[in-house]
Image: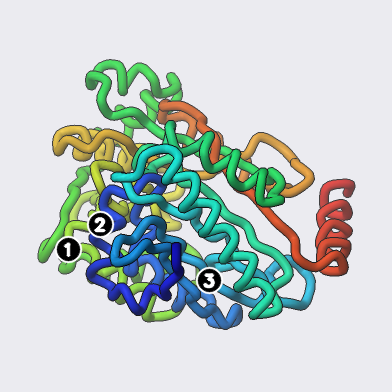
Amino acid sequence: MDVVAAAELGDREWDRLCQDASGAWFWHTTAWRDYTLAYRPALASRSLAFAVVEGTQPLALVPLMVEKAAEHYDGQRFSFGGDACWSPAVAATLDPSQGDAALRAALHHVDELAEQHGVDSVALKLSPLAAGWRDHLPVFIAATTRAGYTDVSLSSQVIDLDVDAQTLRTSMTKGHRADVTRGRRVLDTSVTTGEQAIADFPAYRAMHALAAGRVTRPDETFRLMESWLTTGAAALVKAVRGDAAVGFTYLILHAGAAYYASAANHPDHAAEPIGHVLHAAAIDWLKARGFRRYELGLQQFGPLPHDVPSDKQLGIARFKRGFGGGTVPLMVREKWFSKEAYRRAMGSRIERYAT
């Protein structure tokens, strides 16, 4: 087996392979790579994405990125916008032994790149929306354990859209169902893609800045999000009261699944259940179009040694759980190459966890 840089494959071939590779989702595509490179300029992100190949046949894809460390110490680490990189994805045509060999080769090259670039650590996570997630999960755990990774996993909330509409509604909490009913009396919603969504995008962007009190991300990230609305990779959910938009939710769409990526509600309407109505509209729209899973995102229940959520973050997690579905593993594996950087990072984590 050999290794080639992503540039040698080309963006089109890379994205084609991402469509059904085991362990891959939208996060592995060049679109998300470009977004992450633009996301936090202070991290000085650089792509080191590569593929494991045999002859001309790609066997594994690794969307690796090197950045300045974001965890209270100087140095560099393999991360993605300050978060964990996405796990290696393996060609769907490989049998288990071939897939295991490709994954071993991918993780070995991560070690080689760490030495070449003076990287202190790497974290890899497996999306619950990834193709073949249930089968790939134990393979990913075994391969990373063998390669010296330890567990720093979290959880996420995923709604199974294959169930009937009544089950989807009753799986919501009683409070969420009541808020959806109350909100629908005064709010109208729409879910759009393409040119109609493009027409609403400036209002979403303005609402995003209004809700946050500032512009939170570089212009390039918004430009990319706008472009995905024209390619079928995203949809925009809008809530309207009278003639005025009061809230938006932005969905990422890929391979029969959707991810709740962003939301912005008008601060003058904070007492209204805008978020409840937006998510209910998203669920109905996704189910009607044959999407099978909807990931609402990170679930936090209390402090962990590697993750200490704020009260606000715990409240957001409860809000997401209220829409039903199931809490599933967001498997994250971490490896350290520098003992000194490890001591500093662990000291910082212990301090946060113990206070």
Amino acid, disc 1:
Thr
Residue furthest to the left in view is: 195
- Nearest-to-viewer mark from 2 and 3: 3
What SS does tag 3 mark?
A: strand
- Nearest-to-viewer mark from 3 and 1: 3
Relative placement, left or right, of 278 versus 128 is left
Percent x, y of residue 206: 35, 71
What SS does tag 2 mark?
A: strand
Residue depicted at 43% across the width and 32% down the height: 134
Mark 2 touches mark 1? (CB < 8 Å): yes
Lower sequence index among marks 2 and 3: 3
Percent x, y of residue 155: 57, 38
Compute the Cα span from label 2 to label 3.
24 Å
* Quadrant of the frame with the N terminus: bottom left
Percent x, y of residue 128: 44, 40
Lower sequence index among marks 3 and 1: 3
Percent x, y of residue 180: 33, 31
Mark 3 touches mark 1? (CB < 8 Å): no
Q: Which residue is mark 2?
A: 234
243 w.r.t. 95: above or below = below
Relative placement, left or right, of 130 versus 315 is left
Q: Which residue is mark 1?
A: 231
Q: Which mark is residue 65?
A: 3
Amino acid, disc 3:
Met
Give the quarter of the image for residue 293.
top left
Amino acid, disc 2:
Ala
